[in-house]
Each structure stands twice: as C-alpha cells, then as structure tokens.
Amino acid sequence: MINKPIVAGNWKMFKTPQEGFSFVEECVNLLLKIKEVNVIFSPPFTALFHIESILKHTPLALAAQNVHYADKGAFTGEISTDMLSACGVEYVIIGHSERRHVFNEPNDWINKKVLTVLRAGLKPILCIGETLEQRKSNETQQVLKEQLVAGLAGVSENEMANVVIAYEPVWAIGTGEIASVAQVTEAHGDTRNIVEDLYNHNIARNIAILYGGSVKPENSEELIKCPGVDGFLIGGAALKVDSFTNIIKIVQDNYPKE
Ligand code: PGA
C-alpha cells in the first residue's frame, strides 16, 4: 500500500487553455480540504503552461499526456521532457491505450519514453492493459507481463520509486463498461507479482498501481476498495468539476482500506 492514493484526470484532446484554466481554478477551490490524495491534472500540451501558474502554490500536480524520447531535434510535432519540465510538469502518461492502438506506438518506443522521462527527473505513469480479444482468449496475464517487461526494460531499482503503473483494460476505456471487482483485483495482483519478479517484494509493495476505464463517482468507492488499487486514471469523468472532485473525495474517504 502506498502513502497517498493518486487520482489523475486525463483530459485527452479536450479543453482549450482558457477552459482548462477555469476548470482547474474551480477544482482547486473545491479540493482545499483534500490532503490525503495526490491529485494530478493532465491537460493537452497547450494548456500546461497556464495551469501551472494556478497549481504552483498547491499540492496538486501536472501531467503531460505524451512526450518524445529524444532530448531535442528535428521531430516536427513532438515535445521534449525539458519543455514539459519548464511548464511545471511532474508526471507523464506513457503508453496510454490510445497511443498504443490508435497511433500504433510500439513497446520499444514506450520503453524509450519511460527511460527518458525518468532520466529527466519526471515520473512516468506507464499504462498497460489488454484488449477484449486478448481477455477472451485468456491472454490478459501474458499481455500485462509483455507490456511491463518491455516498458520497464533498463529501469533501475532506484528509478522504480518514481514509476506509477496504470492498469487500463482497453475494452473499459470510454465505453461505460467497467471491469468487475474480481477482474480488477486479479489484474492488479498479477501486475504487482510481475513487478516483484522483475524487481523485488519491497518495490512491488510500494509501487502505485492505478485503475482506469470508465471510473465514475458511482463506481469509484467499490473500485478504490479493491485490493491492490492505489487510485485512478480517469478520462471522461475527469472533464467535469463535479464528477472529478467527487471521485477524489470518495478516494480520500475509502483509502487506505483495512
Ligand atoms: P475513461 O478513460 O475514464 O473515459 O474510460 C480512461 C483513460 O483513458 O485513461
């Protein structure tokens, strides 16, 4: 179990800088009493700089949704870790299923990004998860293992202290369909065991493993109580002030569990 659960809102390609600024301002006011949850906003690149000006005097953090693995260079359309750090970014989402499946990002890119992010002093949120087809053909555990082995290749034991993992079954993302308590518990247990095999018991025990996929205020109590769930990576429900802040309150009230 980790000290503080994490709730990260992944806005995907939604909200202009102005809309993002007002949204975060409203959330900050509603979250003044939240001391026991690490709250992370992950807006599009264009909103990061403005939002940092609100967050810099708060414990709330900023994440980017992607990064390039090179430090700089002729990579039209890409963003480097230095550029993100200069905008106050602390975390970077890597290997989100939309990056893997819509943009065909391969595991070796994901791994290079994880290494670049860590070496820049930022924290990767490494996303893993199976498709519906893979679940139906009983390949979930194998897929999680492949994604973790490849994604974490070359990451040292010390660097693991800065890694966050998000288990997001692809079939539950943006579909309204959530994984059952049994499925979530099993996948989180498998993920932790794989980390233990790759590293050691302590690292596996202390790593934050988030669940993502149609998390909403209505299901968040049940999900945060699942053994091995240390918080959420939220898409749709993170776009509305009410639902996002309600989930954060539910997480604060229900974690740690006995
Ligand atoms: P969702 O997205 O909450 O809308 O299902 C989750 C995610 O993409 O991280």
Image: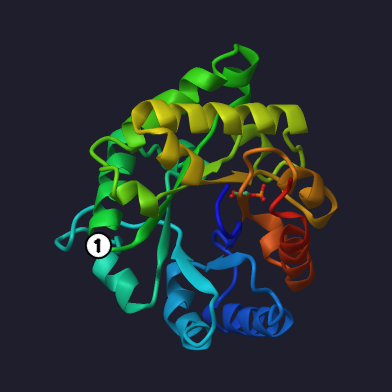
Q: Where is residue 249 in the image (x, y as percent from the top left)?
A: 76, 66
Q: Where is residue 136 in the image (x, y as percent from the top left)?
A: 65, 15
Q: Looking at this view, is 150 or 227 the one in front?
A: 227
Q: Looking at this view, is 175 or 211 the one in front?
A: 211
Name the quadrant of the C terminus.
top right
- Furthest toward the top, the residue is 137
Label 1 SS: loop
Residue occupying the point 70% across, 85% down: 29
* Res. 27 image quadrant: bottom right
Q: Looking at this view, is 172 or 248 the one in front?
A: 248
The reply to whether residue 183 is in sight is yes
Q: Name the residue under label 1.
A: 120
Horizontal side of 238 relative to 51 (left or right) equals right
The reply to whether residue 180 is in sight is no
Horizontal side of 106 relative to 115 (left or right) equals right
Q: Position of residue 12 (x, y in %)?
A: 55, 59
Please tell me how many numbered marks the rendered image carries. Answer: 1
